[in-house]
Image (cartoon, grey):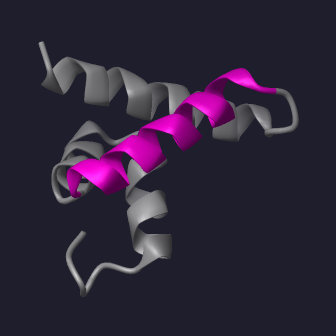
Amino acid sequence: MDQEVTLDDLWEALLSEEPPRIRKAWLALTDEEASAVLAHLRTMAAEAGWADVQRQAAAEALRVIAGLSE
């Protein structure tokens, strides 16, 4: 992850539901960071305890990320 991008900025972009912002944030991650982010997004999208808007945003991020590997 770019040193100038804060963790808050990263998550704001990933959960923005804006595909260009999601792609840019995702592609800036190292493989290790991407693995951790992917696991957290899956948790957010699937597990109870998250607000509907958070679950929806995580699901959209996962959809955009999945589209990058097609």
Residue 11: percent from left, percent from top:
47, 59
Q: Quadrant location of residue 29?
A: bottom left
Say whether residue 13 is magenta: no
Residue at (30, 79) in percent of width and height: 5
| Farthest top residue in view | 70
**Position above or below: 3 against 42:** below
Toward the bottom, the furthest residue is 4
Residue 45: % across, % down:
63, 27
In this picture, residue 56 sits left or right of residue 34 = right
Is 65 left or right of 47, judged from the image as shown? left
Which residue reaches farthest right?
49
Please give left or right for residue 70 compared with residue 20 in the image.
Answer: left
Say which of 28 and 36 sits in front: 36
- The C terminus - image quarter: top left
Q: Which residues are magenta?
A: 30-47
Considering only vertical position in the picture, is 49 above or below 26?
Answer: above
Residue 20's x, y, as percent?
20, 44
Query: Relative to residue 47, is residue 30 depicted above or below?
Result: below
The quadrant of the rendering that contains the N terminus is bottom left
Q: Magenta stretch: dominant SS?
A: helix
Depth order, front residue of 9/1: 1
59 or 35: nearer the eye? 35
Q: Position of residue 6 (x, y in %)?
A: 40, 80
Q: Residue drawn at (33%, 42%), measured in percent from left and top? A: 18
Give the total number of marks visible in the rendering.
Answer: 0
Q: Is residue 39 magenta?
A: yes
